[in-house]
Structures are given as C-alpha cells and as structure tokens.
Image (cartoon, rainbow, N blue to C red):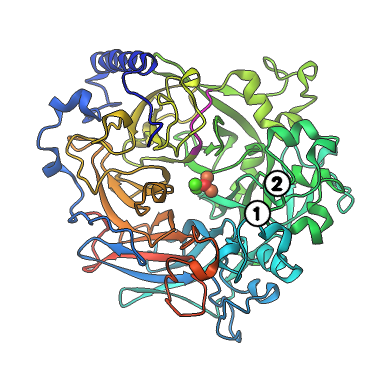
Amino acid sequence: MANAPSSSSPVIRDIIAARVSRREMLKGSLASGALIAGGSFVGSLFAGETHAAAALSTLGFPELKRVYDKTHAAAEGYETTIVARWGDALATGLPEFDGNKAAAEEQEKRFGYNCDFIAFMPLPKGTVNSDHGLLCVNNEYISPNVMFPGMTEDDAGKTMNKEQVDLGMAAMGHSIVEVMLKDGKWAIVEDSPLNRRITATTEMTLSGPAAGHALMKTSADATGAKVFGTSYNCSGGFTPWGTVLTCEEGVSDIFGGDPKKAPISDILARYAFDGSDIYGRARFHDRFDLDKEPNEANRFDWVVEIDPYDPQSTPVKRTALGRMSHEASTVVVNKDGRIVVYMGDDDYFEYIYRFVSSKAHDPANPASGKDLLDDGVLSVARFDADGTMIWLPLVHGQGKLTAENGFADQAEVLLKTRFAADALGATPMDRPEDIETNPVTGRVYAVMTKNKKRDQSKVNPANTRPENLWGHIVELIPPGGRGTEADHTAEKYQWDLFVLCGNPKEAAVGATFHPDTSDNGWFVCPDNITFDPAGRLWVATDGANDFDLPDGVYGVDTEGAARGLPKLLFTCPHGAEATGPCFTPDGTTLFLSVQHPAEDAETLDKAATLWPDFTDGQPPRPSVVAIRRKDGQPVGA
Ligand code: FEO
Ligand code: CA
Ligand code: CA
C-alpha cells in the first residue's frame, strides 16, 4: 500500500473531528431514545466504552483462521456442502457435465456461471419452510480465461468463436433451482418442473414510465416494451408477493461499436459504454453492436422482476426503479404497507437510491403486489456533514428535472437516472454495493466496496478516505423507532459511518473496527451483506485477494458492546469472491455463492485451483455452498 493516504491529512482530521462532534451531539440528544439504544460506537474514538466486548459478542463460534488456499474453509463446528456448480443439470437426461465440451444449447438447462445474489424462496409458496425451496441465483458474468483453454481475459472479446459467445450468453443471467435438505445436506431436485434458466435470450417485458419510450425502440421491437434477456445480474432482492428482483449491473462492456458516433452518445458516455465487447457478442449478434442498434443499450441496466414459482412467467424490467449499475434491490415493507426498495449504483462516485411505491401492499392478497413497482417515487441520497441524510426525489418537473434541462418527461428522468441524480446534487459514494435492513433495529446498512479513484479533493462526509482501497459501511437511520416502527418512507434520515475497513494495525489505513477485532477478523472490500433472523450482520467480501488474503464471510454485531466486532466464519478458495449470502428463514443454513475461483490465472493451465472438483483437465466451477452448524442450530448462535 505504497500510496496509502495519511491519516494526519488536514481533510481527514477535519472530517473525523466533525464526526466526533456529531456523535457527541447524537449521544446527547438521543441517548435515551430508541434510535441508538444499546449502541456503542465503533472504533478507537470510543474505545473506553467497549471493554471486554469480545466476550460479549453474540457470535458463538470459534473464529476461523485465515488461509488463502486451493479450497474453502469454515469455522470449527460448521460443515459445508456444495449445492450447485456451474454446469449442474437442471433437467433429466443430460450427459455428465464436461467443462471442455460445454455448449450453449445444453447450458440453457444447466446451472449458470459466476453465481452471485441468492434468494431462498420456500416451497410450498407462502410458507417459511427452511428445508425445501427454490434457490434463485444470479449468474453475473463469465471468466473466459478459466473456461476456455489458452484464452486470456484480454483476448476473449476478439477470439471467442460463436459457440463460445453463445455459451457465454447462456451461462449468464439467472438460475432457478429446486433444492431439498436431507440428513443435513442440501441437494438439487434435478427433475423439478420449477427449475429454470433465464439467459440473454429470454423474452421479457419492459414496464413502468420508460416502457415504450422512443429511446427504448429497436429494429426488432417497435413497441419499446419487449426485450430479450438480462445480463450482468449482480445482487437483488425478493418481494412479499413471492417474486425475485435481479439487478443488471453495468452492461456497458458487452456492447461493441463506437459509442461516440451513436445518436445517444451522451447517455452512453455517462453509463460507461466504451464498445469493448469483452465477450465478443457484437461480432455475432447485431443487437449488441452500438453502430447498428444503439437503443438496445437503453434496454439494460434495469431491475428485473421474476416469478420463480411460475416457470412460464415472463420476467419484467421495472423502469420505475431507475437505470444504473444496479447492485442490490432490497425490499422493505414499510409500516404503512408501502413498498420500499433500497438500491446502490455500483460504480466510482455513483449514488444510493430508494424507491417508495405509491400504493400499499395488501398481505391478505399477495397477488395485488403485481405492479406495485411500476408506480412510485425514486429518490437519491445526499449525506450532510451534520449527520442528516436527505432523499432527493427524481420527479419530472420538480427542481432541475425539467425539459429545459434535458428531461422531457419522467421516462427520460429514469432513462437518464444518473444525469438526474447529478443535477440534484446527490453525494458521490465509494462504489455502493449491497444495502440491507436490520430486521431487529430497522437501521439500514449500505456497503461501499472501495474507490481507488477518490483523491483528497473529493472526500466528503460519507466517504472520508482518499484512495479508499478498503471500503466502508454506512449506517442509515430512519426516523420512527426500532424494527417495524422505522419509517423507510421519510424524507430525512440520520446516518453514521458504521465501520471503515482495512487492517486496524496499519495506522495509515484508518480502520475503525471494534478495538477487540482479531488478526483474522478484520476485512476489506465488503460487497454483499445480509442479516440473520437475530439481527446480526453478515458481510461477504470481494477484493481481499489484492491484499493476498482470501475473500470470506464475517459475522458482525451492529449493536451492544460488541458493535463493529467482526468474526471470520468462512474463507473462499484462491481467486474467488464470496457473494450472495442468504439465510433460510430459520437461520440454520447460510447459502453463499463462491464466484470466479482461480480467476486471477492468465490462462486455464495456470489456474491456482480447480475447485470444487479438483479434476485434472477440467476447469474450476463457480458454485453455491451451504454452510450449516453440525448440530443443526442457527448459524452464528
Ligand atoms: Fe457485481 Fe457490484 O458487484
Ligand atoms: Ca463486487
Ligand atoms: Ca456485488
């Protein structure tokens, strides 16, 4: 970390001083209130408050020792099962998977590549069963350098043949897999009629204000409301009416052509389209060539709603949720029944968003949720130095969002969400990844994974470190009270920095974990998070490999004397990222996606691991893992 910023820099000193005084204010004014009840602030600034906290951690397992190795590992007392691997059959009658002979048509019936977000949707629908359900898993991207012999990452776009390109299109998207727990082991139900792949060719509809807009029309679709496929599905969410939300996170590099020559060059530039076509799609499919079909680009980077319980259902791209590098789409049912969706736009200096539905959800009639996500107000977050957070509405006709400023109507506000957020003065963040709500406290946690591009002139109250290589977690505090009393529709929240990540022993890093954090417990680059039923935060990391450490999963208390004290539960094999953590309703299984094992290899023959099968001559396989306590008790307890 030769370029690590100095914690003695004036900017950092001023910001920390401001945080201290604000925290003192918060403590003074709210100490007796519900908002920070039981809370002791993270970090050395408040070390005096947190004596003996390690012993008070609610996490009962012995911490795993970090090893960066060929295989994964879990803490003592835990066991792991590989549930679904790239290529596993989702239908009967398929030959045994051979990674060297993988083909597009068959891949449509097999588990996809690079698994990411997981939603566990219980079976039968409407139950809270924890031993039978659908695993709904995003397959974010492909890693050609460890899929195809002799291919490098840089060469893939130019050298993949049509069969490989089409395999890539079929291996990305989303996998829906029926799974059952038997004798403590999860397994796929291979012949389930509910098993389904959603790929780059699956027919979908566009709905909400931007559907049918002129900028959505292509030569293949004069309606601007019918689109094929989804790609770069990163994180997501699920709704109380039994659907899954899958997020398209920045599709810019699957398009070829010259974005500068396109009639929508300004939009393409703001959404980072560079014509790089890294998986060779434009060479074989005109719709991915910006020279031929520029508007096809506008039909991606949305949130897609899928009904996993109906394999014939048509997925819907919900444009009211905005267009961005969608990371999460975490759904909260507000106390008045309105549906709230928290979303991050995962790119450097992008923003945090919230959607609030116009109508309330009726739990007695779950089907009424069908179109709740088409009508509501999308807002973007501004973090102020006094600890206030304001949601700025992205509504056509309000403030600067007028025709004179380039927004002809609400459809254009949504198609150009990033421009609209710029115009309102939202706070640029350090790559906002996942956002989740603590079911016990009602507080919301937003993860900034890292931002090497932020220099000293660009630090702000919620992103305090220049060249932030380690990431941090921001705590959003809605008004109204704990748990279900929290008002997730309020215009004004309070906020705090929950933790600044990195090695606490390196003073220049400025990490603010709990002072009792062990050498195995601190982490970098938080990405996906989830909460267990007891309200403990679980963090999956993406980026530790840059520090020659394994990515993994850490449990963290968010309140009480052990607030901000992480413990390591699970480590990934070499080159892999931990992502998509998801609990069964009873908390006894933690599903986790292990994405891109060995991806750092230049070519397949140099792969550092052939996880999880370790079969000579076969490529590594991204997989979903189930983590359980050997005694079947809840994970973390
Ligand atoms: Fe796909 Fe934002 O990580
Ligand atoms: Ca990531
Ligand atoms: Ca992610």
Residue displayed at 65% across by 54% down? 231
Q: Distance between the Cα atoms at labels 1 and 2?
A: 8 Å
Residue displayed at 47% across by 70% down? 84
Q: Nearer the viewer, residue 332 or 273?
A: 273
Q: Position of residue 305 (x, y in %)?
A: 62, 51
The circle on residue 231 is 1
Question: Magenta: predominant secondary structure element?
Answer: loop
Secondary structure, mark 2, is loop
Residue 356 falls within the magenta-colored stretch: no
Callout 1–callout 2 Cβ contact below 8 Å = yes
Mark 2 CB lies closer than 8 A to ligand 1: no
Q: Residues within 10 Å of mark 1 (few under 14, many from 20)?
A: many
Residue displayed at 37% across by 57% down? 585
Q: Is residue 43 visible?
A: yes
| Residue type highlighted by circle 2 | Phe
Relative height, residue 61 to residue 357 (above, below):
below
Relative height, residue 33 to residue 144 (above, below):
above
Q: Nearer the viewer, residue 603 or 339?
A: 603
| Residue type highlighted by circle 1 | Ser
Residue 429 falls within the magenta-colored stretch: yes
Q: Which residues are magenta?
A: 427-432
Q: Position of residue 592 (x, y in %)?
A: 41, 59
Q: Residues within 10 Å of mark 2 (few under 14, many from 20)?
A: many
Q: Which residue is tagged 2? A: 300
Q: Is residue 142 left or right of residue 555?
A: right
Q: Earlier in the sequence, mark 1 or mark 2?
A: 1
Residue displayed at 23% across by 69% down? 630
Q: Nearer the viewer, residue 466 or 583?
A: 466
Q: How many marks?
A: 2
